[in-house]
Amino acid sequence: MPQFVPQAQPPLAFIPQCISPWVIKIVRALLPLWMPWKLSIASVQADNLDTLINLYHDFQAGDARFLMAFRHPSTKDPFSMSYLLWRLLPQAARQGKRRFNRPTYSHFIYDRGIPLWAGGIVTWLFPRLGGTPILRGKADRLGLRAARHLFAHSPYPIAVAPEGGTNEHNEIVSPLEPGVSQLGFWCAEDLHKAKRTASVYILPIGIQYRYVSPPWTALTNLIQDLETDLGLAVNAEPLPGLLKDPQADQLYGRVLRVAEKLLTDMESFYSRYYH
């Protein structure tokens, strides 16, 4: 039940990161069990890991600083990124007979508002996993200053989603926030002032999700419920011939019919009541 707020609340306090190796080790051990149980992620696969391995080696040698700019289609992305850095990356390095000087941890930037709905455990956990907060939608000087310092001086790289928030699309990229490129310029500036010669990189990382088995039954039931609510007859129209798979083509045709019916009903409603 929503709580009544009688007065204006103070601004959200900044939560400094305090990365904890033992906390990361515990989360790393639980991650393979948590992902299929709570997130329905059966496995994580990665391509072109050689680029990331080389960047980590250059970073740990002091020759490079880098930021991982990852796609953000889902709230599951932080778990996928963690699995990539904590498990897949070290495995690929060992297969190539390469070793890192320190674990492949990473800082990350998160929205300061997340702990408000995610709960106190996130408030405690995120800083210990290397997270640094930012207030979205305003000039958060303290948050930007902390991220800038980590980018230029931390023993670990940093990760951020340039889209700012999830969009639930595998292929469509939302407008990118300018803060990622700005962090890159700030890092180069800070290195120049400190007379350090390390190069600065922004590494794009794409994330896509695929079904292990197509969920045709669930989609069919959902579309059938929509058709019933709208008074449409099931399978009344021929296949549209837009997709190669006959089953997918049939469902897609039914989705188009549902969409057209919804638009027609809405147009009729507004024409009748709002002229």
Image: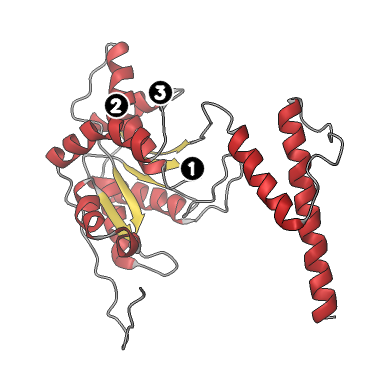
| Label 3 SS | helix
Q: Position of residue 211 (x, y in %)?
A: 53, 31
Q: Nearer the viewer, mark 1 or mark 3?
A: 1
- Label 2 close to label 1 by CB (< 8 Å): no
Depth check, front residue: 266 or 67: 266
Q: Earlier in the sequence, mark 2 or mark 1?
A: 1
Q: Residue at the far bottom: name it.
A: 6
As drawn, the label of residue 49 is 3
Mark 1 to mark 3 CA distance (whole Å): 16 Å
Q: Amino acid at mark 2?
A: Arg
Q: Quadrant of residue 97?
A: top left
| Label 1 SS | loop
Q: Position of residue 182 (x, y in %)?
A: 43, 54
Q: Position of residue 198 (x, y in %)?
A: 31, 37
Q: Amino acid at mark 3?
A: Leu
Q: Earlier in the sequence, mark 1 or mark 3?
A: 3
Q: Is residue 63 visible?
A: no
What residue would you read off at disc 2?
Answer: 87
Mark 3 to mark 2 CA distance (whole Å): 12 Å
10 Å crowding of disc 1: few (<14), some (14-19), many (20+): many
Mark 2 to mark 1 CA distance (whole Å): 19 Å
What residue would you read off at disc 1?
Answer: 71
| Label 2 SS | helix
Say which quadrant the C terminus sits in: bottom right
Q: Amino acid at mark 1?
A: Arg
Depth check, front residue: 81 or 57: 81
